Image (tube, rainbow, N blue to C red):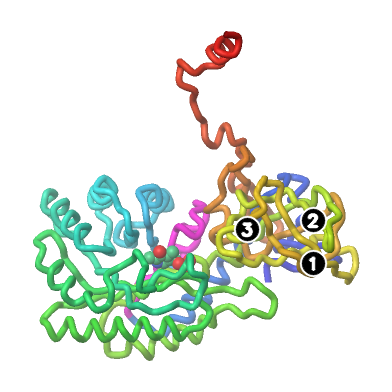
Amino acid sequence: MSFQMRDGVLHVEGVPLPVIADAAGTPAYVYAATALHDAARSFVDALAPIARKQLLYAVKANPHPAILPTLAGFGFGADIVSGGELQAAQAGGIAPADIVYSGLGKTREEMGAVLDAGIGRFNIEHAREGEVLSALACARGMRATALLRVNPLVDAQTHAKISTALTDSKFGIPYPEAIGMYHRLAALPGLNLQGLAVHIGSQITDLSPLQAAYRRAGTLVAALRTDGHCITHADLGGGLGVSYRAGAPGADVAACGAMVARETEGWDVTLLFEPGRFLVAQAGVLLTRVLWVKPGQPHPFVIVDAAMNDLARPALYDAWHEFIAVRPRDREHFAAHVVGPVCESGDSFAHPRAIDRVEEGDLAVLATAGAYGAAMASTYNARALVSELWVDGDRFDVGSDRMPAALARPQRVPRWMAVSGQRAAVGR
Ligand SMILES: *Cc1c(COP(=O)(O)O)cnc(C)c1O
């Protein structure tokens, strides 16, 4: 319980949020180290029944450099999807053998850099990628260890934009074509193909789609063995969901561990897991201040200083984040919109809903914002890049500075378009 009301004030561990707002300003992501530990421990415990496994943190959920070393302490390596994430994983001290390179659009340069770094494993998404990877490995006198990503064609029953195994998904090789593709790639001289990978989507709370996907993967493992392939690894992806909304439970991680143990019994492989959201979502909130309360019919607009550029999930996925006053005024709720200052109607965190009654100047948090929050932040509307802080017990420290847009993204004016030139044009 890292985020709790104490004496009428919301605390992160031992630190009252107003103290953080005074020290660091708003908006700011505030992360609780203990919550990260708790999530990692519950994941590790849930998978205790599985003897041969490799745990990988999906870096894209939150690439903050404090996270990887912390999770490494619980046995996690890194699942990366870009050259930038390779650098983040290396900077985080993750050994090459504990890194898996996933992703649909790897460039030749990135694949080369990853091979040169001695990365443990590639998850291949399509035939050409496999062929090019094989050639790049051969040119280096090596073989790339790889898994073939299969699209098991299972609806993850989550938001369409984070479903990855529908018939029209861009990811993986469709289940009916998987065996043929496996034969083809396994024959390439530069690949050491060791098995399959599946990942059907994100924010999955009902385990049955995962179970269906794993069952299909199991069928393929057996079929490929019958065909004479040596299958030693299966990557079961990430996707476990968390509770964003009071009354809407997250995935039951212990039940998931038990289900995986049941479904994979007899596979005789090392299982890989790539959780992202599950590990970090509940470890962070977005701290914000109410700028104005603007009357509206029938509901007022609570205008906060956080916006869609800081937390994109509501605008992107209609995602729900609880809006909680840091110092609730009373037990009363009122129905209001919660919106940011960005000049788009989509910059809204809550369509009218019952929230804590807040007034101008009050602090509040958007809860459960540790995953796909800061990771997606931008400087849209020339707003500063949002800052991050870490809390551990009674201490806190800055994890990233608020960065003015002009510094976060220095842009240059071509010499012939410089200001003096413009003035000249206007004067003509
Ligand atoms: C995004 C992603 C993950 C992590 O997903 P979560 O829902 O955050 O657990 C894991 N594996 C792959 C291939 C991904 O694209």
Do tag 2 and tag 1 residues touch (Cβ < 8 Å)? yes
Whether 58 is drawn above or below 212: the answer is above
Q: Is residue 282 left or right of residue 15?
A: left
For residue 188, what is the image quadrant?
bottom left
9 is within the stretch colored magenta: no
Q: If the image is split into quadrants, where does the C terminus sit?
A: top right
In this orientation, does residue 76 appear? no
Residue numbers of the magenta segment: 52-74
Amino acid carrying label 3: it is: Tyr
Q: If the image is split into quadrants, where does the N terminus sit?
A: bottom right
Of badges 2 and 3, nearer the viewer stands 2
Amino acid carrying label 2: it is: Val
Residue at horizontal 57%, vertical 65%? 281
Which callout, 2 or 3, points at the residue further toward the start of the chain?
3
Whether 50 is drawn above or below 184: the answer is below
State the residue position of label 2: 302
Instruction: Tell which quarter ligand 1 is in.
Output: bottom left
Amino acid carrying label 1: it is: Ile
Q: Secondary structure at mark 1?
A: strand
Which callout, 1 or 3, points at the residue further toward the start of the chain?
3
Residue at horizontal 86%, vertical 51%? 360
Q: Is residue 357 left or right of residue 109?
A: right
The dot on residue 31 is 3
In this orientation, does residue 258 appear? yes
Which callout, 2 or 1, points at the residue further toward the start of the chain?
2
Of badges 1 and 3, nearer the viewer stands 1
State the residue position of label 1: 355
Q: Is residue 101 left or right of residue 240?
A: left
